[in-house]
Image: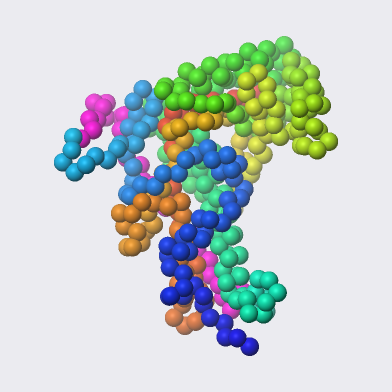
Amino acid sequence: MPVITNPFDAGGYSLAEMTEAINLLPNIYTRLGQMGLFRFEGVTQRSVIIEQMEGVLNLLPTVPLGGPPTVANRDARSMRSFTIPWIPHDDSITPQDVQGVRGFGLSDAADPLATIMERKLTKIRAKHAQTREYMEVNALRGIVKDGAGITLYDYFSEFGLAQQSVDFLLGTATTNVQAKVREVLRKVEGELKGETMTSVLALVSPGFFDKLIGHAKVEEAYKYYSSTGAQPLREDTRRRFPFAGIVFEEYNATVTLSTGATETLLPANEGLAFPLGTLDTFVTYGAPANLIETVNTVGLPMYARQIARLDGSAIDVKTEASILPVNKRPGLAVRIFSSN
């Protein structure tokens, strides 16, 4: 019987190698991650300074040593420093986890410890991905929340901005829904301020979606779309519906917070309309790990390492992420809702 050894020990997987492995694992349970809405950008510090000018939030750039500095806006409220939240999550592999577990595949030589490690990293990766999705959805609304649901930063309050919104009044049969859609499109276009876009997507709650497709001014268009373009016998037509220039997509995601409470990412009868194809509007900044060897390095989406306990009782799997999602043009994400 082969001796169980730790394949991730010294001489096996370093911090860099395990970090690369966890970042390459599939990114599941994330609609925003799937569409790549928020571009990731690593930074070398654990805080960022954001300046607001004419409704646009910008990170202050670096300049060559001795070069000309950037000039701050004279309005003191237009510049803020934000600490990038630190999100550590640990697990461990104990003898009970490995006992009786076959290695991956049919070979008896396959190491069960490596199989268990991969399973642990996959589960941890999913938790970090779900946390990032939660933070990025809230960032679309101009808010940064942590995994406990606590608001860390409200960009609207910090910079004296206001969120745009449109009441679709879907409970009124005579509402001109196309006019409401055009209003949303014009609000988005008016807030581009030098940015580009390809289209507008609206993620909406199930209640909003049902009211939209059941509205007297929309029902016929939805019937035509579902019977021709969407091939209803093969596709779930409740998910997406293009109408008057906006693609409406049902987004029914609920997360379990660290407190044990559950939270639906979009409130009932609400949604968010925002542009796709932007170049530099939705960014998630990442700071380096809280480790000596990563000081002053460019941050990665997440980090992973393992430490074998001296008494041989377990292998600790330690992961962390330090991310701050920012919607640089908060007015671009329009809150849409139906008050009746």
Q: Residue furthest left?
A: 66
Give the vertical position of 42 relative to 95 (above or below): above
Choose between 74 and 103: the one closer to the eye.
103
Q: Residue at x 53, y 56 (%)?
A: 24
Q: Position of residue 176 (x, y in %)?
A: 68, 12
Q: Position of residue 260 (x, y in %)?
A: 59, 53
Q: Quadrant of the C terminus?
A: top right
Can residue 150 be seen here? The reply is no
Q: Is residue 269 left or right of residue 79?
A: right
Give the vertical position of 224 relative to 110 (above or below): above
Can residue 224 be seen here? The reply is yes
Q: Residue at x 72, y 11 (%)?
A: 174
Q: Residue at x 44, y 28 (%)?
A: 329
Give the vertical position of 92 relative to 128 (above or below): below
Q: Is residue 3 left or right of residue 212?
A: left
- Reply yes or no: does residue 84 show up in magenta: yes
Q: Is residue 159 left or right of residue 181?
A: left
Give the vertical position of 166 relative to 259 (above or below): above
Q: Residue at x 58, y 26 (%)?
A: 200
- Reply yes or no: does residue 251 show up in magenta: no
Q: Position of residue 249 (x, y in %)?
A: 66, 32
Q: Quadrant of the N terminus?
A: bottom right
State the scheme by which the image is colored.
rainbow
State which quadrant residue 320 falls in.
bottom left
What range is drawn magenta here?
Answer: 69-98
Choose between 193 and 252: the one closer to the eye.
193
